[in-house]
Image (cartoon, grey):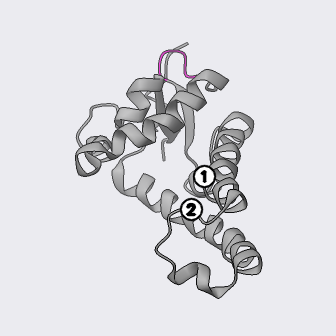
Amino acid sequence: MPIDESQYEYVGFWLRAWASVVDSLLLCIVLYPLLTMIYGREYWTSTVLVQGPVDFVLQWVAPAIAIIAFWLARQATPGKMLIRAKIADADTGGPPTRRQAIVRYLGYYVSLFGLGLGFFSVGWDRRKQGWHDKLAKTVVVRPRR
């Protein structure tokens, strides 16, 4: 069953950006004390990209797993939940599959190319899809008011 546009609206750039800020702040609240405890305050002034295996896991692997897990369990991260948005399969309107969630997450890196053009495309695309959404065949929707 496709997205019922009388019940749902596609979520645009600014609301999605706001949800992303919320998610980023939550990640910082969790990661800042952990990384400071493990590596000390010098961690935050270092120019080294990855300061060790724990840093790599906490900064790259754990967030990816957490975000994909939220998408699969709730169809949204906490930021998207705050704005009542959810990620859905673009064709059926159902929850994303594991494959779609992984492709969508990896698609974030593709969307960064060209100074973030793949994210900005959410602002002018008819279904408010970024490149990561198009790659994964997903949309972000919320109930109409």
Q: From the viewer's perspective, is 135 left or right of 95?
A: left
Q: Position of residue 74 (x, y in %)?
A: 71, 40
Residue 30, quarter of picture:
bottom right
| Spot occupied by residue 81 in the image (x, y as percentages of width and height) | 62, 52
Residue lying at the far top of the rendered structure:
1
Q: Is residue 119 above or below residue 15?
A: above
Residue 43 x, y percent position in the rendering: 60, 79
Q: What residue is rendered at 59% in x and 30% in y? A: 102
Marking on residue 81: none
Q: Is residue 105 above or below residue 52?
A: above
Residue linked to disc 2: 50
Is 40 or 81 nearer to us in this picture? 40
Q: Amino acid at mark 2?
A: Val
The majority secondary structure of the magenta stretch comes to: loop
| Cβ atoms at labels 1 and 2 below 8 Å apart | yes
- Category of crowding for the residue at label 2, using alpha-carbon neighbours closer than 10 angstroms: few (below 14), some (14–19), many (at least 20): some
What is the magenta range?
A: 90-94
Can residue 8 be seen? no
Q: Which residue is mark 1?
A: 60
